[in-house]
């Protein structure tokens, strides 16, 4: 598994892929946090990083599928997937190696946003007047969200040898699982009956819960369940070549 992890991580950082992903994310977040007047924290009357945690999921819907779309699609397109599976490692180890490498790139993209926290901390009146617990919870929720999206992206990549198809499928699945259930809960058939239950199936419900600074084990278990589900679906998708 470690050999796959280092191979994928090296592929990200030895080419422009990793730097473009990190650069695009930081440029967009920088514009949102400091330039656009409607969201700039310099125009707010109180210290907050709400803009970061509200915009980041939208960016991740497109950014993480762009990271994962090549994971298996490129292997299948180049015909190297058969060489990969002949190594003395299991399919699950291959998947986990690629998954952890994708998460590493996301972690490197999130790391510089610590400067935003420092900026807001310094701008507070008095200095440090902000809810650090809620911000920490939001960062944990954002990383769990990235983990779920990465698992979805790997699954989409395993379904097709075309990277564009994998990207579009992953972006659709990420969007639907994040916001789709919230939209479904507003249908007349569910409103006033089981709308709360329908919302609980979506990522947005649990992400917002963690962002309040309360680390409920039910929310954490939900994220790990989504990650495990899509990793197992990826495993089944890879094993279909043996059928």
Image (cartoon, helix red, strand yellow):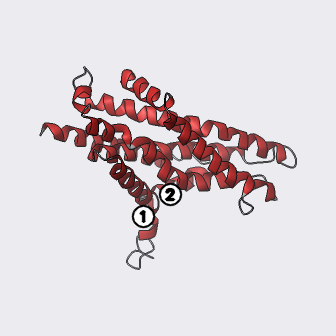
Residue 171's spot in the image, x, y percent?
42, 54
Q: Is residue 229 visible?
A: no
116 over 186 or under it: above or below: above
> Which class describes the residues within 10 Å of circle 1: few (<14), some (14-19), or many (20+)?
many
Secondary structure beneath dot 2 equals helix
140 over 3 or under it: above or below: below
Residue 179's spot in the image, x, y percent?
46, 62
Q: Nearer the viewer, residue 71 or 17?
A: 17
Instruction: Measure the C-alpha gap from mark 1 to mark 2.
Output: 9 Å
Q: Are marks 1 and 2 in contact (CB under 8 Å)?
A: yes
Which quadrant does the N terminus fall into?
Answer: top left
Q: Nearer the viewer, residue 122 or 196?
A: 122
Name the residue: 25% across, 32% down.
81
With 219 as the anchor, is 116 left or right in this view?
right
Name the residue: 43% across, 23% down.
6
Q: Is residue 78 visible?
A: yes
Q: Determine which of the numbered discs, if any, sits on residue 220 in the image.
A: none
Q: Quadrant of residue 119?
A: top right
190 over 128 or under it: above or below: below
With 141 as the anchor, is 238 left or right in this view?
left
Residue 166's spot in the image, x, y percent?
34, 49
With 66 as the anchor, is 124 left or right in this view?
right
Residue 103's spot in the image, x, y percent?
48, 36
Disc 2 target residue: 204
Disc 1 target residue: 181
Q: Earlier in the sequence, mark 1 or mark 2?
A: 1
Secondary structure beneath dot 1 equals helix
Which quadrant does the C terminus fall into?
Answer: top left
Q: Nearer the viewer, residue 194 or 171?
A: 171
Q: Quadrant of residue 192?
A: bottom left
Name the residue: 76% across, 48% down.
130
């Amino acid at each position: 598994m470690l050999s796959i992890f280092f191979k994928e991580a090296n592929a990200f950082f030895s080419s422009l892929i990793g730097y473009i992903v990190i650069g695009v994310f930081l440029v967009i977040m920088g514009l949102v946090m400091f330039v656009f007047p409607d969201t700039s924290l310099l125009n707010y009357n109180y210290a907050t990083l709400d803009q970061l945690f509200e915009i980041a999921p939208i960016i991740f819907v497109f950014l993480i599928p762009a990271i994962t779309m090549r994971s298996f699609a490129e292997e299948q397109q180049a015909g190297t997937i058969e060489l990969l599976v002949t190594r003395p490692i299991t399919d699950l180890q291959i998947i986990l190696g690629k998954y952890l490498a994708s998460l590493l790139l996301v972690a490197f993209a999130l790391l510089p946003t610590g400067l935003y926290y420092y900026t807001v901390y310094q701008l507070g009146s008095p200095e440090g007047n902000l809810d650090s617990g809620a911000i920490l919870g939001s960062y944990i929720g954002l990383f769990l969200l990235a983990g779920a999206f990465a698992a979805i992206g790997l699954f989409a990549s395993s379904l097709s040898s075309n990277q564009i198809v994998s990207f579009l499928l992953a972006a659709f699945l990420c969007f639907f699982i994040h916001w789709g259930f919230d939209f479904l809960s507003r249908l007349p058939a569910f409103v006033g009956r089981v709308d709360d239950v329908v919302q609980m199936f979506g990522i947005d419900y649990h992400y917002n819960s963690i962002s309040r600074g309360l680390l409920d084990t039910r929310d954490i278990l939900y994220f790990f369940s989504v990650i495990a589900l899509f990793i197992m679906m990826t495993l089944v998708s890879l094993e279909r070549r043996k059928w």
